[in-house]
Image (cartoon, rainbow, N blue to C red):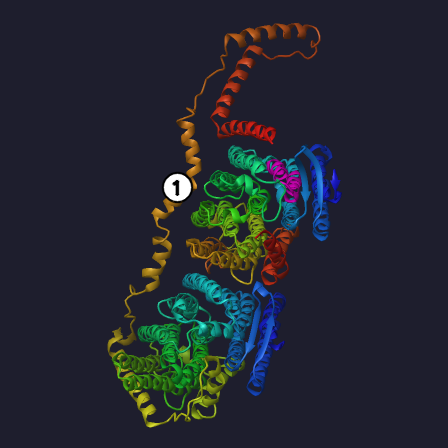
């Protein structure tokens, strides 16, 4: 083990804490466990800060074989995902203390919640594809209990489906590893890619096919058509904090995988103008539309949000596959925005379920009168998801569209932005009525029945923080965009 | 850098939050605070206007706001319109405490009103389309609660329409901005103008220009996106209607002016298109107003028609090219006039509604009898909007009319047919006549006719139908109208020359003779048409019911674009069953493939064995184990004997093993496991190779 040992901390802290929570019976006591979990989450956020501040460092953990090291490295992308995931995970964690109080098996939930965070920290820090793959699989397996949590028939079925899709995706990714190990000079992530031009010469069609399969594999976690079906099944059955992070964070793990393969191993130049780029642009555009349309027709709130995730994560992927610097910036910006937005929306849905037991959209008339703070956050994030200025979603959409238009002469240059806007309209159609009916129940509404049901600060403060961040990020994105532009400049 | 500009934008927004927090404790203090905030805003904007008129433009830029930066600039038009906007907000806010005294949710109203004020000022001060768009969207959303405020069924429906049309308009404009930015590389007004002028042909800009225009046209109430306007303005509380009609529509016009004078300056094609939509809007609005039997709806349709007049002016600017001085001035002045007129008229409507709680002409007729202040204010508004000489509306309409005449003359000089534009002139004069006719209809109904049912009730209100603050707001707005019109060369010409720079207009070579014979003839023609039309109204649009002549709603209900076309289009035809079915099919594509495989290739069907039977082997093994257990139970475990029957347990275990085996071998993951094993072999092979 050599290099910057402080990189171990963000992984080790939640790992140790998670194992303790899982195996020490004393943590059955809610107060102790919540304090401990909260401290562990806060500590993990704290431990990501050195990585953020110290610039690029590296840590070689061990060698699988002589040629396959397991490496942590804090390049730009790693830092972005590290801090984002740790922060959002902690926020949702704090929120869940109140939510989970009415669920069973809290200890198991928090154990796996922390362990999944450890896997995600490792995933963000991964410096080689093999490292990434290890943590990717670990993340899938460790997050499974979050889906299974309620242990009902549907939950188990959803869990199996989640596992099945994930394993299938990972196996495709693994296939990619085998071939890339051969065709790349190294599996270590290098901006711009490491393809060995000599070996590749003559084998382009094969390699393109393999890369496509591998990207499709990572696309499963990102909920890309045709392998998105696990999302709308898994989200409604999981407890709300779990759905929040599944939707807001775990899907981003797939995005990270695609970013790594596309920009740090294969290199954008190899794919530009090929059928692979066209295929994925097509698939992502289709997914954007499909997800929005299905969300528009869905009546179960959490399932509606799940379909919305399908659509929104494909915004990100679309931006990546434009293979332009502006599109890249827009994509990673949307990663951040969507993580903030979707977690808040799911936390809102969770608060509604916890306090009123309502799960269907048509039951939510007057909900704004009952839980104004929650619904204000929900509304702000809905507006941000539609992409109305001055929120974060607007800025990322601006970059995504400009990225698409800078692709030059392809049909997706204009089709992409058009579909983004159609999807935005559908987003308005499936989110705004919840707010408008929630705040404007109509003159005949029974005001007496609309008793206050506002949750405590433990629930509302994380929502407020994320919603406020989302708006602030939209108004002053300068620091983040210049950070992303620096990364984009390196890889494109 | 002038900090006054961002203060004008963000001060009301901060004030909105302050008023909300304040209103949760003390409602009277909140009302006072809001009046004070808007008064300060007006004072600041007036100071800005003075500074701009005296010492030239002021600018402010905030780099990196929303990634693209925020730029504000106050030139004549923008400073003036900021002042007008804050004046209107001040007057309506002064009027609000009394109007809203019996309302719920007033806190919400004030919060969003002040937010809208900030955003509106932001739109008017913006110096690039991006900033315009940002504030435009904030304004659209923040004004939604106005329309929905009453929470009656029709308010909510109108508000829904308002919201979605605003969202659609915003998205279409955004697409236009994407394209413009990709093509021109800048969205600042001056930059766009330079880049557009450098292009060989403006044709490439037509699509992005049209898209950008759409969103602004929606807000302005331009046909065919006008459907929200009559409904929303009619259901909102009166102070909000005044603002929606008087100032929010002007933000749309402002956007159209930005596009027309920076992207398509002096472009005849563009002028023709705007002229066309302007004419349709102008005539349609006026016809709808003639048919309407609801006070606020008539005023709302009138707004639409007047916006049509303004758009005709914008179109003429493009057509007249470098000779567009009169059209520019007419457009600018009609904007100002219409803002102030509609402020007065909607406040009048507010006075009626807060006393009578009704708006239907048959129910409120006679309300104004014996109420001189209301009478005065309404009459000023009506005369001005009808274009009667000595009032503001006459000046601006005359200028626009002269613009048309000038263009016809220009075409005549060039030897081109001008028949089409003669027709436009006729439409213009007829619409002017219709304006007079529907305003007369309102005026006669309110102030001269007697109400058969509750005239005594209305008369009892005389002298105490509004408090001093409301009276101040109403009269303060009304006295401006004749003041501006009586001495046009003092006020109107000056206002026009302050505003025209924004549209790159020049002052006309000679001072305009507003009261020349030609102009007076035009007005007279218009007024005659109006008189005839009013006679027709009384003949055709009234009927006798129970011995009383009442206003009848003769407009065919089926002629409603929203109900007949837009709602079905968006809610039924676009997401039609076919599309839904297709998306559902795609959604379940993978799952159905997996299921199909399980039922066919993998032969996995559900089988239920009743009781585990097991095989000979399990039976034999189980018997042996049972014997051992018996032995153990007698020796080691005699205190806690094992009671399991191993023959049954083993048989059950075997069944379980078989079924899970089936499940595993039938599942995709088993196939994948095999795939993985295969790949691991490949992996090892590759590694030994290297």
- What chain does mark 1 sit on? B
Snapshot quadrant of residue A266? top right
Q: Position of residue A165 (x, y in %)?
A: 51, 36
Describe residue A116's horizontal placement relative to residue A247 as left or right: right
Q: Is residue B527 above or below residue A276?
A: below
Q: Is residue B238 above or below residue B488?
A: above
**Camera sees residue B564:** yes
> Around disc 1, counting alpha carbons within 10 Å, would you say few (fewer than 14), some (14 to 19), or many (20 or more)?
few
**Camera sees residue B151:** no
Report the number of numbered marks.
Answer: 1
Q: Is B474 or A489 nearer to us in this picture? A: A489
Query: What secondary structure predominates along the stretch shown in magenta?
Result: helix
Q: Residue A72 in magenta?
A: no
The residue depicted at 74 percent of the width and 37 percent of the height is A1
Describe residue A121's horizontal placement relative to residue B272 as left or right: right
Secondary structure type for disc 1: helix
Describe residue A57's horizontal placement relative to residue B525 as left or right: right
Q: Position of residue B149 (x, y in %)?
A: 48, 65
Describe residue B633's horizontal placement relative to residue B423 as left or right: right
Q: Position of residue B570 (x, y in %)?
A: 37, 56
Q: Which residue is mark 1?
A: B585
Q: Residue A117 in magenta?
A: yes
Q: Quadrant of the C terminus of chain B?
A: top right
The residue depicted at 48 percent of the width and 38 percent of the height is A206
Q: Is residue B393 above or below residue A336?
A: below
Q: Is residue B126 above or below residue A453?
A: below
Residue stretch in magenta:
A113-139
Q: Is B461 or B686 nearer to us in this picture? A: B686
Q: Position of residue A215 (x, y in %)?
A: 52, 42
């Amino acid at each position: 083990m050599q290099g910057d040992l402080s990189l171990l901390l963000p992984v080790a802290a939640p790992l140790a804490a998670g194992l303790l929570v899982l195996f020490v019976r004393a943590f059955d006591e809610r107060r102790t466990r919540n304090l401990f979990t909260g401290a562990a989450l806060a500590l993990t956020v704290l431990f990501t800060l050195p990585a953020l501040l110290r610039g690029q460092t590296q840590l070689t953990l061990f060698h699988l074989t002589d040629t396959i090291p397991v490496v942590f490295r804090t390049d730009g992308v790693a830092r972005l995902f590290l801090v984002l995931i740790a922060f959002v995970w902690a926020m949702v964690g704090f929120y869940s203390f109140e939510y989970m109080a009415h669920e069973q098996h809290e200890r198991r939930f928090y154990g796996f919640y922390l362990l999944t965070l450890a896997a995600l920290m490792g995933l963000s820090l991964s410096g080689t594809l093999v490292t990434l793959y290890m943590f990717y699989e670990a993340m899938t397996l460790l997050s499974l209990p979050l889906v299974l949590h309620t242990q009902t028939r549907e939950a188990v079925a959803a869990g199996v489906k989640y596992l099945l899709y994930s394993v299938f995706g990972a196996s495709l990714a693994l296939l990619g590893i085998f071939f890339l190990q051969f065709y790349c000079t190294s599996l270590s992530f290098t901006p711009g890619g490491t393809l060995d031009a000599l070996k590749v010469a003559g084998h382009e069609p094969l390699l393109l096919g393999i890369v496509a399969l591998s990207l499709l594999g990572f696309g499963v976690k990102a909920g890309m058509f045709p392998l998105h079906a696990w999302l709308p099944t898994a989200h409604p059955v999981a407890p709300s904090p779990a759905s929040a992070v599944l939707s807001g964070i775990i899907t981003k793990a797939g995005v990270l995988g695609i970013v790594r393969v596309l920009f740090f191993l294969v290199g954008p130049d190899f794919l530009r103008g090929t059928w692979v780029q066209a295929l994925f642009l097509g698939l992502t555009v289709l997914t954007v539309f499909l997800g929005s349309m299905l969300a528009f027709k869905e009546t179960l709130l959490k399932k509606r949000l799940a379909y919305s995730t399908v659509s929104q994560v494909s915004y990100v992927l679309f931006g990546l596959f434009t293979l332009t610097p502006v599109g890249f910036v827009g994509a990673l910006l949307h990663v951040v925005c969507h993580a903030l937005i979707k977690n808040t929306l799911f936390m809102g849905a969770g608060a509604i379920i916890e306090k009123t037991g309502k799960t269907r959209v048509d039951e939510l008339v007057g909900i704004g009168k009952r839980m104004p703070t929650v619904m204000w956050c929900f509304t702000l994030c809905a507006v941000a998801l539609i992409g109305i200025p001055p929120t974060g979603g607007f800025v990322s959409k601006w970059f995504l569209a400009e990225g698409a238009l800078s692709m030059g002469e392809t049909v997706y240059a204009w089709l992409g932005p058009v579909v983004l806007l159609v999807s935005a309209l559908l987003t308005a159609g499936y989110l705004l009525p919840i707010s408008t009916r929630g705040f404007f129940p109509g003159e005949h509404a029974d005001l007496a029945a609309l008793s206050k049901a506002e949750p405590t600060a433990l629930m509302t403060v994380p929502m407020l923080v994320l919603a406020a961040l989302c708006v602030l990020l939209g108004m002053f994105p300068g620091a983040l965009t210049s950070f992303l532009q620096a990364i984009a400049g390196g890889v494109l | 850098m002038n900090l006054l500009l961002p203060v004008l934008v963000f001060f009301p927004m901060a004030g909105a939050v302050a008023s909300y927090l304040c209103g949760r404790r003390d409602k009277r203090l909140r009302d006072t605070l809001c009046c004070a905030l808007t008064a300060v805003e007006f004072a600041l904007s007036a100071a800005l206007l003075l500074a701009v008129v005296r010492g030239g433009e002021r600018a402010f830029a905030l780099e990196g706001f929303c990634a693209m930066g925020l730029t504000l600039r106050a030139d004549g038009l923008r400073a003036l319109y900021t002042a007008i906007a804050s004046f209107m907000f001040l007057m309506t806010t002064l009027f609000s405490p009394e109007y809203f005294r019996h309302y719920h949710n007033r806190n919400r109203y004030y919060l969003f009103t002040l937010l809208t004020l900030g955003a509106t000022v932001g739109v008017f001060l913006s110096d690039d389309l991006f900033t315009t768009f940002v504030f435009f969207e904030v304004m659209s959303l923040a004004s939604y609660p106005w329309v929905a405020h009453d929470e009656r069924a029709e308010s909510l429906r109108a508000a829904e329409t308002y919201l979605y049309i605003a969202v659609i308009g915003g998205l279409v404009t955004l697409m236009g901005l994407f394209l413009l930015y990709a093509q021109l590389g800048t969205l600042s007004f001056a930059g766009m103008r330079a880049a557009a002028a450098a292009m060989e042909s403006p044709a490439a800009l037509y699509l992005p220009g049209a898209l950008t225009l759409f969103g602004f046209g929606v807000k302005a109430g331009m046909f065919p996106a006008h459907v929200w306007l009559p409904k929303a303005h009619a259901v909102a509380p009166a102070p909000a209607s005044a603002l929606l009609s008087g100032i929010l529509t002007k933000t749309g016009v402002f956007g159209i002016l930005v596009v027309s004078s920076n992207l398509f300056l002096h472009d005849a094609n563009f002028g023709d298109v705007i002229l066309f939509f302007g004419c349709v809007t102008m005539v349609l609005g006026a016809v709808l107003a003639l048919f309407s039997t609801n006070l606020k709806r008539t005023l709302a349709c009138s707004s639409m028609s007047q916006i049509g007049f303004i758009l005709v002016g914008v179109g003429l600017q493009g057509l007249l090219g470098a000779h567009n001085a009169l059209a520019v001035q007419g457009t600018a002045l009609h904007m100002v006039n219409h803002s102030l007129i509609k402020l007065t008229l909607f406040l009048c409507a507010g006075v009626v509604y807060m006393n009578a709680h009704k708006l239907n002409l048959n129910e409120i007729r006679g309300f104004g009898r014996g109420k001189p202040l209301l009478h005065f204010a309404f009459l000023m508004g009506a005369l001005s909007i009808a274009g009667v000489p000595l009032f503001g509306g006459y000046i601006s309409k005359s200028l626009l009319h002269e613009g048309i005449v000038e263009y016809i003359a220009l075409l005549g000089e060039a030897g081109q047919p001008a028949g089409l534009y003669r027709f436009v002139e006729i439409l213009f004069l007829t619409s002017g006549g219709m304006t007079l006719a529907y305003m007369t209809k309102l005026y006669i109904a309110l102030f001269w006719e007697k109400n058969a049912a509750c005239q005594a009730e209305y008369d009892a209100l005389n002298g105490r139908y509004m408090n001093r603050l409301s009276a101040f707001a109403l009269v303060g707005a009304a006295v401006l109208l004749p003041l501006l019109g009586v001495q046009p060369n003092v006020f109107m010409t000056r206002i026009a020359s302050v505003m025209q720079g924004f549209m790159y207009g020049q002052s006309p070579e000679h001072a305009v003779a507003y009261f020349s014979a030609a102009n007076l003839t035009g007005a007279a023609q218009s007024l005659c048409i109006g008189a005839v039309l009013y006679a027709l109204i009384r003949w055709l649009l009234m009927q006798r019911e129970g011995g009383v002549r009442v206003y009848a709603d003769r407009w065919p209900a089926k002629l409603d674009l929203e109900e007949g076309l837009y709602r079905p289009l968006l809610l039924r035809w676009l997401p039609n069953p076919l599309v839904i079915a297709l998306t559902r099919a795609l959604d379940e594509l993978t799952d159905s493939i997996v299921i199909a495989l399980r039922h066919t290739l993998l032969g996995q069907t559900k089988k239920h064995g009743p009781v585990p039977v097991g095989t000979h082997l399990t039976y034999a093994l189980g018997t042996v184990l049972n014997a051992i257990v018996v032995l153990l139970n007698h020796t080691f475990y005699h205190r806690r004997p094992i009671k399991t029957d191993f023959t049954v347990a083993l048989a059950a275990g075997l069944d379980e093993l078989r079924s899970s085996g089936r499940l595993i071998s039938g599942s995709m993951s088993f196939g994948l496991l095999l795939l993985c094993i295969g790949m691991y072999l490949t992996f090892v092979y590759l590694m030994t190779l290297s």
